[in-house]
Image (cartoon, coloured by chain):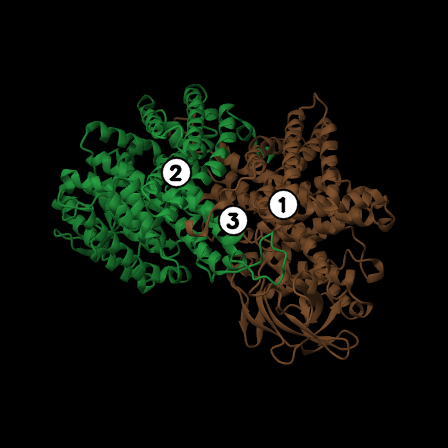
Chain colours: A green, B brown
């Protein structure tokens, strides 16, 4: 069985591609070291293999059951949850003053990659808990933190994000759940939420729902939305859970994948209202929630990259073991069959998967390093630039690995053929699991609008400018005689086209926003290819240096070949997209309903 | 609930796009008419809705069960099988002398489209039976036909194609199942077959397995393969089934989709050998089997097109009913939400699906019309040309709708977002069902090799030449001032590039076949886009004529917009592929196993 991830890859990304080791020089991490981080990663690797990978298939085949007694998950899920909490991963990145280990973000996320590769459906519970706790850390009152943070850090409580409602979907401004102010300063919530992952389970004593709702009488639209903390069980003044709050599971949704993650319809206030407390400022609920949503979006990118990675390695194993047919040059039917991996088309499918999976992983960890730099970079300009890159590219970091990941898992299945299409192979589950990633945490179309309608133009285009500078810096570092020079030139050409189409599309939003944003998803797609190409060029440069140093030849050659593949086979596909964007193609926009 | 297919579309394809009405002028169909064919299609429409669509979801949720007593399917499957047989569809295309109705191939396949849109997993049984019977009709001895054809025509017997073996997969030359000659002229078969769809069931009294095996002592490779008829139950001299033959179900495979189609491992000769009789000539088994395989390949294209079509119409329904958010130009949060279909990106997803689904359906029925012409065209040259086109393009007709269909169903799910990802929506099942089509009846890679390694070069390139002439004829029919002229020019440019890369790739096969064929799957992909563009231009021309005649404006505008979409959004993607092919890109080929 393939290892969950290739450890060498993670080390390459953290310590060669990213300069994670240098974090030890920052005051916050003064007492930490690469050795410590390696130990953390080793713990994650072992735990992921022992407690998460063990029931990935079982959780898929045995969905959570909803009965009058509550939700029942297969028992391995609870064992995984407890082990994850016991190892300290729920609070590893918290400040020492909060009871955490002050672990760097990028190290935490690299650790999460192990768990993601093992079992995304079970990881969803701690993943959401980490995000909800971070939201509370950012905007909660001292009292809210006192009551709820510690249980969320040690596994007694889990967290959720409760945004979506049955009639509203992606349009968060139309949220209808109502919060009625009470005399004691608390609120009573009434309304229904849908697709709430982890909305109920039998893993933790309590669940902390982070709920978007509208204070009674608040204005329509996003300005009327506030954020509330609504626990599953009411707590005493020490945060200990007691009586059930007025939050009921109205049903479970049955998904194509991620089956071991409960997806719930939650009913708030069927009786006298679910007791909640306001988090942060009234009317700023959506802005606050973006703290958790943005983190979750990077997280979805990482889920996608890891599912793609796992599929790639399993397909590679299959292709190496399974012998079938002969090469076109071999006409002798008595000659032995060759392994699948010897066939050029299979190699193409594997190399593409490598480019997508390892590229996605590199991109997501880069984003985590920006998050890190935004918080702890010693220079204000360093923090500013990292923050702008993170803001600008969050839609890409979420969407590109998801889209490429679906392609990768599709190719993994194709490598295994009929066998891959059966439920006897893990590839089948990975294919189903992966398909959620372009949907949850904002469908692709939403991210296109976010990128082209907000991010590219924000602060007068400052973020796009920083991105351009970063890419140009990379390109400038490739010498004319460097074997990678053709790739650098191609990246320069793609960047030029991207910038050429961006300006007019931003300008057009002032006069004809419907037309300007009609092809926003295409813009996102093309932008994603440029970003992925940039990431691959940087990886290839690091690999080139490794080769020059005479180390690990096969490993570095593989990286360079994957980069070459991406530039020769995937980046060119961006140019027809730029053409569509340049002429602001209106064919879909002009299609009329009655013509369908 | 959306109708299974839009009837107007089928009529457009049969009677406007294809000149099916003219078939009535051919001697074979002298006693038939459009009215008769319409009645046949109406029967199919009704039967598909009543007896196939009714249990599509139920069959998915309740897989066939394998027990010592045999296989059990949900009872609706048997009702569907019986109704299909009773309506005469199993033998509708047979000669009158065989007991058939002499229905034209293209009418039969158009009828099958109704069933495919309803429930591919149940259709698989009659589909395979029709194919196996056709194989028997083509190569069976009078005695074999006397015993088995009638039951296969009235539903007492079903048919299968038994090619694949556990250790061999796509490499048919490595088949190991052995046939031992007996004194009475029959054979005893020993071996194991895998992924045999319909290999057992409880629908019919008997099953006729068409089995590839190697007569004991036959040479290695494809030249040693022969075709055998092996019934599940031995028959008496009137063809009535009696004792069980030595064919055992060794297990069922559990697929991601098509769950109501049994996928079996069959064991031949666990006891004293499965009794079989040779079909056609010894050593020509594979050539004979290609009769059924080619028919099945067109059939897989049609499955794919119909699954895509069904998903498209369901997604369209959803997008029309579901209101969500507002257009970018609308800033008032109190304004009502608009239907999803009003959003430009949703419209793009729907228009792309329309282009893929309706393009695929048009392509598959075109292929059926070539099959028809190959048999019944009055002119020898007409028969020759149709035969060449069919031969050349079978890999495309199988692969392009499958690939585009996966994209279409992916987009259908995206339109419905989280709802589409749940098993409460049919889109989820369609997504899983569709994924088989790029795998079964030859994986994409196999068809790439078939197209570039055999078909393009066969008969000194005669087939490619005929294809070129047909496309040029279409282009020449578009006047310079025709609104479709830009599309015709673009098609001419794409055809030129296709032909430019084809010659060198064929030539290179003589000296370096491994390199020449390394990108055969890319060649197939690019070729498919050109063929689909051709089909769309022809549909747009017919629609333009309809518009000019002042009929059905919305319908024809939709066809033209889908054509415009395809040319603006999909065909341009072929050009980067041509670039790869032109320089015979070797990046995947040169990747080494140890670099992964």
Q: Tag 2's secondary structure?
A: helix
Instruction: Give me the disc on residue A536.
Output: 2
Viewer-proximal residue among B542 and A301: A301
Give left or right: position of B474 versus A80.
Answer: right
Q: CA distance from mark 2 to mark 1?
A: 34 Å
Can residue B73 be seen by looking at this rendering?
no
Question: Residue A438: image x %, image y %?
Answer: 42, 43
Disc 3 to disc 1, C-alpha distance:
48 Å
Q: What is the C-alpha distance between the residues marked 2 and 3?
A: 35 Å
Q: Nearer the viewer, mark 2 or mark 1?
A: 1
> For residue B224, which quarter of the picture?
bottom right
Quadrant for the N terminus of chain A, please.
bottom left
Residue sitting nearer the eye, B87 or A126:
A126
User: Can you give x and y, in whole percent of width and height, for residue A596 in the image?
Assistant: 59, 36
Percent x, y for residue A303?
A: 36, 47
The residue singled out by tag 1 in the image is B511
Name the chain letter of the residue that bears numbered label 3: B
Circle 3 residue: B427
Instruction: Tell me the subunit letter for badge 2.
Output: A
Name the element at disc 3. Answer: helix
């Amino acid at each position: 069985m393939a290892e969950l991830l290739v450890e060498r890859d993670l080390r390459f990304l953290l310590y060669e591609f990213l300069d994670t080791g240098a974090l030890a020089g920052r005051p916050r991490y003064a007492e930490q070291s690469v050795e410590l981080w390696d130990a953390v990663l080793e713990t994650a690797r072992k735990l992921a293999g022992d407690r998460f990978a063990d029931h990935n298939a079982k959780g898929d085949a045995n969905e959570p059951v909803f009965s009058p007694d509550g939700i029942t998950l297969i028992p391995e899920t609870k064992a995984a949850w407890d082990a994850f909490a016991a190892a300290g991963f729920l609070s590893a990145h918290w400040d020492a003053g909060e009871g955490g280990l002050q672990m760097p973000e990028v190290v935490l996320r690299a650790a999460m990659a192990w768990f993601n590769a093992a079992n995304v459906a079970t990881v969803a519970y701690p993943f959401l808990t980490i995000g909800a706790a971070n939201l509370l850390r950012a905007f909660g009152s001292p009292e809210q933190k006192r009551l709820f943070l510690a249980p969320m850090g040690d596994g007694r409580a889990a967290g959720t994000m409760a945004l979506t409602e049955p009639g509203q979907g992606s349009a968060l401004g139309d949220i209808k759940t109502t919060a009625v102010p009470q005399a004691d300063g608390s609120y009573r919530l009434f309304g229904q939420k849908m697709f709430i992952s982890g909305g109920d389970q039998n893993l933790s004593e309590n669940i902390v729902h982070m709920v978007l709702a509208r204070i009674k009488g608040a204005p329509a639209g996003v300005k009327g939305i506030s954020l509330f903390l609504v626990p599953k069980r009411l707590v005493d003044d020490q945060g200990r859970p007691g009586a059930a709050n007025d939050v009921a599971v109205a049903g479970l949704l049955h998904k194509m994948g991620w089956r071991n993650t409960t997806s719930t319809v939650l009913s708030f206030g069927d009786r006298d209202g679910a007791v909640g407390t306001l988090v942060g400022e009234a009317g700023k609920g959506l802005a606050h929630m973006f703290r958790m949503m943005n983190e979750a979006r990077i997280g979805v990118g990482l889920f996608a990259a890891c599912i793609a990675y796992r599929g790639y390695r399993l397909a590679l194993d299959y292709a190496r073991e399974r012998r079938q047919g002969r090469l076109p040059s071999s006409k002798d039917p008595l000659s032995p069959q060759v392994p699948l991996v010897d066939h050029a088309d299979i190699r193409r499918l594997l190399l593409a998967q490598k480019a997508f999976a390892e590229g996605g992983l590199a991109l997501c960890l880069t984003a985590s390093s920006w998050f890190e730099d935004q918080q702890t970079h010693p220079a204000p300009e360093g923090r500013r630039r990292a923050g702008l890159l993170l803001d600008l590219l969050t839609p890409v970091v979420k969407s590109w690995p998801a889209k490429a990941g679906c392609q990768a898992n599709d190719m993994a299945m194709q490598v295994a053929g009929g066998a891959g299409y059966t439920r006897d192979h893990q590839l089948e589950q990975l294919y189903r699991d992966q398909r959620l990633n372009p949907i949850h945490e904002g469908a692709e179309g939403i991210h296109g609008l976010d990128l082209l309608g907000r991010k590219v133009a924000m602060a007068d285009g400052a973020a796009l400018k920083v991105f351009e500078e970063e890419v140009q810096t990379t390109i400038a570092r490739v010498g004319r005689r460097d074997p990678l020079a053709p790739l650098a030139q191609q990246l320069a050409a793609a960047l030029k086209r991207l910038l050429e189409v961006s300006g007019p599309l931003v300008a057009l939003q002032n006069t004809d926003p419907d037309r300007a944003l009609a092809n926003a998803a295409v813009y996102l797609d093309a932008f994603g290819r440029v970003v992925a190409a940039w990431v691959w060029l940087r990886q290839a440069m690091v690999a080139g240096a490794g080769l020059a140093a005479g180390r690990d030849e096969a490993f570095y050659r593989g990286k360079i070949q994957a980069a070459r593949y991406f530039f020769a086979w995937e980046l060119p596909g961006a140019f027809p997209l730029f053409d569509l964007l340049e002429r602001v193609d209106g064919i879909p926009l002009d299609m009329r309903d009655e013509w369908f």
